[in-house]
Image (cartoon, helix red, strand yellow):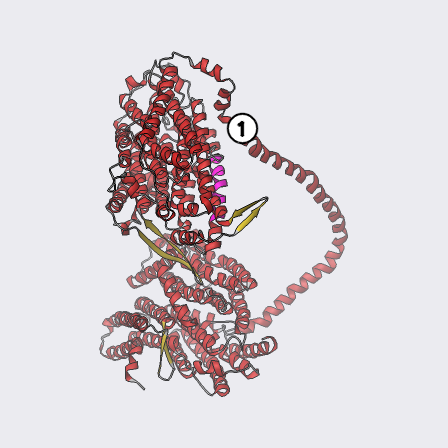
Amino acid sequence: MARLAWLIPLFPLVSYGVLAFRGRSLGERAPYVAIGAMALSALVAWAVFLEQALGAEPFVWRAAWAVGGERVITVGYTVDPLSSITVAMITLVGGLIFVYSVGYMHGDPYYARFFAFLSLFCAGMLTMVLANSFLLMLIGWEVIGLCSYLLIGFYFRRRSANMAQMKAFLTTRVGDTLMLIGIMALFWQFGTVDYHAVFESVRKGAKEASAVVRLGPWEVPVVTLTALLVFGGPIGKSGQFPLHVWLPDAMEGPTPVSALIHAATLVAAGVYLVGRAYPLFFFTPHHEALVWVAWVGTLTAVMAALIAVAQDDIKRILAYSTISQLGFMMAGLGVLGYTAGLFHLLTHAFFKALLFLAAGSVIHAVHTNNIKEMGGLWRCMPVTFWTFLAGFLALAGVFPFAGFWSKDEILLEAYHHNPAVYVLLTAAAFLTALYMSRLVAYAFFGRYRGPEHPEPDPWLPEDYERAGLHPPGHGHHHRQPHESPPVMTVPLVVLAFFALVVGFVGVPGTGPDGGSWIHHFLKFEGFEEAGIHAPSFSWPLALRSLAVALAGIGVAWVVYGLRWVRSEQVRAWIGPLYPFLRHRMYIDTVYGWVFVRGGLALATGLRWFDVHVVDGLVNLVGWVTVLLSRLHRLFDTYVVDGLVNLVGWATRGLGSLLRPLQTGRAYNYILVAAAGVAVLVLVSLWRL
Amino acid sequence: MNWADLRWLVPELVLSAAAVLLLVADLFTPAERKRWLGWFAVASVVPAAASAVILLGDLQALRSPGVRIFSDTYTLDAFAVYFKLVALGAVALVSLVSLEYFPGRTPHLGEVFALLLFAGVGLLLMASASDLILLLLSIEFVSLSSYLLAGFLKRDPKSNEAGVKYFLYGAATTGVMAYGFSLLYGLTGSTSLYDIGPRLGQAGPAVYLAVGMALAGFGFKVSMVPFHQWTPDVYEGAPTPITAFLSVGPKAAGFAALVRTLSVGIPLEQVNWPLLLAALSALTMTVGNLLALVQRNLKRMLAYSSIAHAGYVLMALAAWRSPWALQGLLYYLLAYLFMNLGAFFVAMVAADATGSDEIPDHAGLSQRAPWVAAAMAVFMLSLTGIPPTAGFFGKFYLFAAAVDAGLLWLAALAVANSVVSLYYYVGVLRALYLMPPATPGPLPVPAGLRAGLLVALVGTLAAGLYPQPVVLFVETARRLLTG
């Protein structure tokens, strides 16, 4: 089965090709192509995954792509527990989101294009996951970056969407550039970009003293520097501090895009890459690259959770929550919790996709993103409410939902390997439960606070108007919100089911050796070599994290549900902290001033220099030239023109001289050949 | 002589037997069934190619880099097998399209295929010859068959002219080469390349004279400036399938012989032939490209372009010290086989309808035969060297070799030449796609030609998109030749 793994990215790619070229004529039928392709992919992916789960050997297939002397650059794919479980997750979540999109995007004038982009995205993502080398990984990585750009700006007439797509592309580019340098550094050090070969070299190199580079006052081992450069890519793609700013804005894209790309898959690509390249990070001296990963992740987790508490836009809250959870994953990987971080990646994909889709269903019904204009929705949208609740409990980490098991793993690893990280992550877990409960309380409980007659949408694109259509979540409105069609709610129910059960693979005792199955399936070989053992599940710690989650929910319930304490009062207590969080810690503002305005100011300055100094010089030169030209004119007419004519005559003369060389007379040709031999011999004698 | 050694000659023997059988069968075949002879010729390539592949397997089983038989006159190694397969591919594809071209133009159909097979036998021998005598004989063998094929349409004055010119020019340059070979023999007392190398000693004027004269013969085969002048006249006049054959078969075999002669027989340390060939490469690509720019006749344009491509391939010899060089040469010649044959096949499609090879007469082909025009677009882009076609990878290897060997100026010149070449290749596409057809209506494409085009198209794309098999074969061949 593993030999067929190359089919997994191929199906969506073919679907992309069909939709790109025949999409218009397919019209309403476009989604069936995309969904059919995803279903086939999912079939192969699950077969491959089950085969691995039943204990098949990992399989790597390589083809030489270019050979330069002794260096062979290969392309190919690798099937092992990590890649197989990830493609299984992507094809399942992706397929469900495709189905949901049929309902959500229905009536969009660019229906086929949407599914074409989604298909291309899946092809890129699956390629990236299955790749056997940094080269092919990078190709997939760039494809998904491009698709993310295209899909964020899918409503391309909306200015905010244009700005958001640009922001996303440019911000992630910073990280991608660092990663590209890192990959080039790998190629320079090891002469290959093949995962296996690189990791073997790193592992062997770990036993010797490594070369160092001087960076100012610090001496950094080359391998650490390389690992951190490669980590630049994940920082950008997975929205880690300080490159997280693009992700909340990326919510300008259609909600299925937010669910698939900016919650379940693309943003997880960075975490996946750290997991894939784990040896590169692990075998640095004292695991110092992992320490960096852990702290970046922890910082991100806490920061994003804090910001999320003070946001009102339902998708932005979920976006900051995504950033925070990605931080959890990174922190998990960083504190030697290889399995824990990747386990959280898998469970998070299910429940965060669920939350986004359910939020989409809500937006579809109430035509606003602002949770303060919702309320009481549990009554009119029961399926959406109950499924959202499942996602909420999973994210908050409530027993026995998926998030409880995976988040607990991370906290457990942190407790044993890095207590400071443990404390901070516990705080972040408390905040997670808090902001999610706040969201649920505002949106689903209380009284409906939506306007009776919403304002017409100012940006409504003329395409939509002409077609008499309305983009989802905007335009035609109902007095009373109502439940979404089954094509949207069925995927919600399926995802809710997974949000409940997918964590059970992490329950202790499910694996053959008494531990959990996921620990048995996804493990990092380097740990055994280094004598590091995964800490075993401990009930006291698990109960402690459950208590933290329940405390968060309780506090939120007191403030936003029961309103014993009014939120205005809380705001007054915390003073300047509230505006600080509300304005996203002013990070976007600072970037705006420093990079955008700074860049513009630099450009303006350069332009001034250009206009006044360079142009002045040019004009001066112009004046002088005009003067000289006048003088030259006489010279030109009589001397230069004469020369030009002479050249013309000479060329024609030379042409006539050369013409006999190609007249068709064989004896002339032979004469030239004979002369050629003579010249060759003479030249050889003279030069060689 | 050891009779058991004959087994290494099975491909040649199979092809010779097929050719003789075909000649005899021709006598007894009624005119309306002569096409069967063509199919026989195409089919006979299959066992020859299969036996070549089997011999390669035998070589690997022996763990031997190559066997030398008949007192070192004949060498079979992976390098030779590679060129044999290229030559057999050319013979098969050209026979396939000849099936559609020659009926109606000549009654002597059987002889066309017999001559093609004989020329094929010569090509197989050229790829393996490691002795000056066998080298000369095999080159002559290929040449004599080619002269006849070029002048085959004897009622067509242009074909006549092509045959006679080709013969006169070939005779003269081969004579010069034979003189050069005799000097080498005089200097070393041996005709075997394996002996000549070690015995050559310090280079003196006689060595340079010998090398220069030998280059005349090789230069003629591969259309290297200044031995290129026959090319446009012969390419234009010869029947188009034969032109296609001449542009890839003898050219590839000529490069095989040239590589073997120089790398085995003329030690780098004594004669700095890479430098000499760097100059010739620069000259060849520039002259070919500049002259191709002004051509209006498609076959003549392709003739000059084939001179330019000889220049690119010569870069590999100029950069011989780089490990990329031989790889590039081998890969490029395979890519060239597909893309150049394809281009000539397309030329046949339109010429059949309009009776003209002028580029403007191909106008509007995209409307009359859209798939043929699309294939031509692929061939032209590949000849220019645009990814993801085979031509791109070929050029990439060659340029990389030049850079690797420190010949930056040559690589830069080759890039400049490639840019220039875009002009005339795109000119063809302009006619095909942007100019309206003189006569509307779909253009019939005969089955054999369609098959040939398809193989060329698939080859051009496959070698670019999935180069692994070629790359690995090429790598093996390189290791075996250079040790």
Of residues A347 and A289, the one nearer the viewer is A289
- Tell me the kind of residue under disc 1: Thr
Q: Which residues are magenta?
A: A166-182
User: Image quadrant for the N terminus of chain B?
Assistant: bottom left
The quarter of the picture where residue A314 lies is top left
Query: Which corner quadrant of the image does residue A91 belong to?
Result: top left
Name the residue tied to disc 1. A589
Asked if one can make out residue B106 in the rendered structure from this viewpoint, the answer is no
Instruction: Report crowding for label 1: few under 14, some 14 to 19, many 20 or more residues within 10 A (C-alpha).
Output: few
- Coordinates of residue A124 in the picture (x, y in percent): 37, 44
Q: Position of residue B261 (x, y in %)?
A: 45, 77
> Is A199 in the magenta?
no
Q: Identify whether B111 is placed above or below A638.
A: below
Magenta part, dominant SS: helix
What residue is rendered at 71% in x and 59% in y? A640
Q: What subunit carries mark 1?
A: A
Q: Percent from the top left, x then y, of residue A646?
A: 68, 64
Residue A174 forms part of the magenta stretch: yes
Q: Residue at x 50, y 40 (%)?
A: A174
Q: Horizontal and vertical percent for residue A217?
A: 59, 44
Could one spot residue A576 in this view of the protein?
yes
